[in-house]
């Protein structure tokens, strides 16, 4: 089952992306430094993105981060994005509005 962020309906797109980046990064055992290296980004830039001190992102940067985190780009935009498993097929996504149905 997908993890739902608290107050996901009230999160901005940037907050969702940052939360997903951090969750996926830590689940993979990556530090900010190692993710920055894997993505080919400057460490300080990645740190500012994840901490919310960088106001906006280019789509190409989100794509680069998704590739480095080994997920599809859309997964970074979903408030309850699942952790991609090694199983064949797409992971099931339970959206906040679908919870409890």
Image (cartoon, helix red, strand yellow):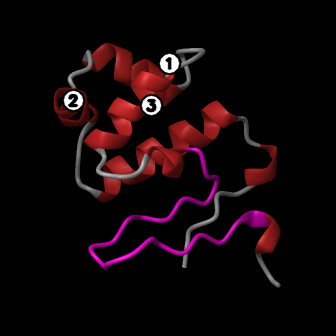
Specify whether residue 88 is painted magenta.
yes
| Residue marked by disc 1 | 58
Q: Magenta residues: mostly which secondary structure?
A: loop
Q: Name the N-terminal-most of marks 3 and 2.
A: 2
Specify whether residue 49 is painted magenta.
no
Could you tell me how far apart the alpha carbons at marks 1 and 2 are, in whole angstroms? 20 Å
35 lies above or below 29 = above
Q: Which residues are magenta?
A: 77-96
| Residue marked by disc 2 | 33
Residue extending furthest toward the bottom: 101
Residue at the image position 24 percent from the left and 35 percent from the top: 35
Quarter-wise, where is residue 53 in the image?
top right
**Under tag 1, what secondary structure?**
loop
Quarter-wise, where is residue 64 in the image?
top left
**Under tag 2, what secondary structure?**
helix
CB of mark 1 within 8 Å of CB of mark 3? yes
């Amino acid at each position: 089952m997908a993890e739902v962020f608290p107050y996901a309906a009230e999160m901005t797109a940037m907050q969702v992306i940052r939360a997903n980046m951090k969750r996926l990064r830590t689940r993979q055992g990556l530090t900010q430094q190692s993710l920055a290296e894997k993505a080919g980004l400057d460490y300080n830039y990645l740190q500012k993105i994840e901490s919310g001190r960088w106001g906006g992102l280019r789509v190409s940067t989100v794509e680069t981060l998704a590739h480095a985190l080994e997920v599809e780009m859309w997964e970074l935009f979903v408030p309850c994005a699942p952790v991609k498993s090694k199983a064949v097929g797409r992971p099931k996504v339970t959206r906040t509005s679908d919870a409890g149905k």
